[in-house]
Image (cartoon, helix red, strand yellow):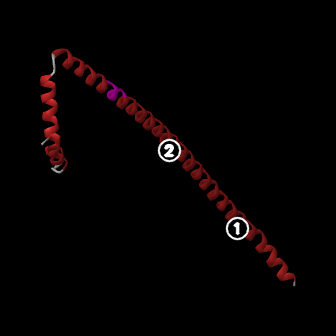
Amino acid sequence: MRRQKKWEDKHVPNGRIEQSSRKRTKQYEDNLPDAEFKTLIIRKLNKLKGRVKELSEDFNKEIENIKMKTQNIKRNQSEMKNTITEMNILGGINSRLDEAEDRISDLNDKIIAPIRTAVRERI
């Protein structure tokens, strides 16, 4: 009969297996003498404590990773701001160079035009 029940447990939905397993565990714990029950509880608490410690360590590692990523993002933002500032400065310089070239060209035209006229008149 016991083997048959185990076979049935394997072939029923998970919810029923979990419930029957919990019932058996509860019955087992209820039938334990006081000292054994306390020992069992202490073992479970120690196991839980270890798991909490593991999760805490994992959580702390994740926090450190997030802090590092945040610092990298801030550093990248600062670099981008500096790059944009440099680009704006270079854009201003290029604009001034273009204006200077235009003025030089205009001055050349003003200077060369009378000379050309004079040369044409001599020819």
121 displayed left or right of 109: right
Rendered image quadrant of residue 53: top left
Which of the two marks, 2 or 1, is nearer to us in this view? 2
User: Could you tell me which residue is drawn at 81 percent across and 74 percent down?
Assistant: 115
Rendered image quadrant of residue 38: top left
Query: In the displayed image of the protein, which residue is found farthest to the front?
Result: 1
Q: How many marks?
A: 2
Q: Which residues are magenta?
A: 49-53
69 displayed left or right of 6: right
User: Could you tell me which residue is drawn at 17 percent across and 41 percent down?
Assistant: 18
Disc 1 residue type (three-letter): Asp
Of 46 and 16, the residue lying toward us: 16
Disc 2 residue type (three-letter): Gln
User: Could you tell me which residue is drawn at 79 percent across and 78 percent down?
Assistant: 117
16 displayed left or right of 54: left
Q: Which mark is residue 77?
A: 2
**Which is more N-terminal, label 1 or label 2?**
2
74 displayed left or right of 2: right
**Residue under label 1:** 106
Disc 2 crowd rating (10 Å Cα; few below 14, some 14-19, many 20+) is: few
Of 68 and 11, the residue lying toward us: 11
Q: CA distance from mark 2 to mark 1?
A: 43 Å
Q: Which mark is residue 41?
A: none
Of 59 and 111, the residue lying toward us: 59
Q: Secondary structure at mark 1?
A: helix
